[in-house]
Amino acid sequence: MNSALKTGFPPFTDERSLSSAIASVCARFGSLKSLRILPATRDEGLLCACLLRLDSPAAELALKSNLFVGEFHPDIVFMADVDEAWIGRRMA
């Protein structure tokens, strides 16, 4: 999922741009039912944990098998790289 976001969209500087890109990538599998974006940090920089659900188990299975995302039951989870100019929420 992170590589699909990196190749098809500009760098993410806020939650709205990241959320919009995630919805766009997920649209080919199904409708986005829920999305939570949680900022995180690591030595290499800032990233966001993204937890989402799609409208059906079949859509979620297709997303998981095509874009190599994990599962943190009941959510699908992946880490998304964001731009160093990120103006969205940050870890406290």
Image (spheres, rainbow, N blue to C red):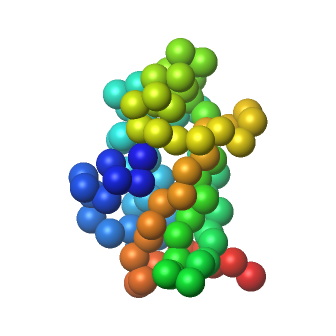
Number of disc labels: 0
On the question of residue 4 being in view, the answer is yes
- Answer with the quarter of the image where residue 84 lies: bottom left
On the question of residue 31 being in view, the answer is no
Q: Residue at x 52, y 77 (%)?
A: 46
Q: Residue at x 59, y 41 (%)?
A: 70
6 sits to left or right of 43: left
Q: Quadrant of the C terminus?
A: bottom right
| Towards the viewer: 44 or 19 | 44
Position of residue 89 relative to residue 30, above or below, is below
| Towards the viewer: 33 or 44 | 44
- Answer with the quarter of the image where residue 71 lies: top right
| Towards the viewer: 55 or 79 | 79
Position of residue 33 relative to residue 8, above or below, is above
Counting from the top left corner in percent of width and height, residue 23 is at 43, 42
Position of residue 75 relative to residue 46, above or below, is above
Q: Residue at x 39, y 68 (%)?
A: 12
5 sits to left or right of 59: left
